[in-house]
Image: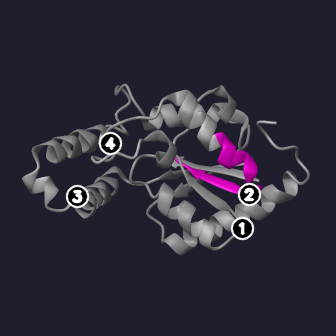
Amino acid sequence: MKILIFGASGSGKTTLGKEIEKRSDFIHLDSDDYYWRKTKVPFTEKVPLAVRNEKIKLDFKKNKNVIVSGSMLTWGEEWKAAFDLAIFIRLDNNERMKRLKKREIQRYGDKLRNDQVTRKNSKEYLDWANQYENPKFDGRTLRVHNDWIKLLNCEVLRIDGGAQLNNKVEKVLIALKTTANNVCNKLPKFG
């Protein structure tokens, strides 16, 4: 079974994916691991679309049960039909921005104060992330995600990112059982 968790940056996609991996037979793939090159300054160099798609599809196909965390809407048309279940996680914008600011401090520490490039990159990232609920913003937004949901060829489970992690996991595990019954013996995608 193939599952997608998507939502705004800082909504808890990766945390939920990792926790489901711990409590099930699913392999967690974080789209950021395919999207960004491993560089000295992280999250600054994108992997070309064709290369990242090739790499994630290899891991996607070689595992029976996969949960991908991240927004796949710009990765190609084939991803609309690649999943058996999509989980859209949404978190109040103020809470999400608090999480992101805390994560930036944890990730970069003193470099946020002492390194001009790190500080600039962090500010640009936080400014971008804060636009998620702005319907006029040209980028990944709530509007874009809601439009993408209509195009997905699978059930979409909506989850409150502010709920306790255990409650979110339990809700997903119940949905997985229901979905598994519906897709039993389904042919693998990306044939």
Which residue corresponds to the image point at 64% horizontal and 33% vertical from the top-left? Answer: 150
Q: Amino acid at mark 2?
A: Asn
Q: Position of residue 48 (x, y in %)?
A: 48, 29
Q: Quadrant of the C terminus?
A: top right
Residue 11: say if magenta: no
* Alpha carbon distance from label 2 to label 3: 33 Å
Amino acid at pointer 1: Asp
Q: Which residue is mark 2?
A: 65
Q: Provide residue 85's location: percent of width, then percent of height.
A: 70, 49
The residue that mark 3 highlights is: 108
Q: Which residues are magenta?
A: 57-70
Query: Where residue 42 appears, x then y in whole percent?
Result: 32, 47
Residue beneath disc 1 = 25
Q: Mark 2 vs mark 3: which is more N-terminal?
A: 2
Tell me which residue sits at (22%, 38%) in the image: 124
Q: Is residue 115 left or right of residue 24?
A: left
Is residue 68 in the magenta section? yes
Q: Are marks 1 and 2 in contact (CB under 8 Å)?
A: yes
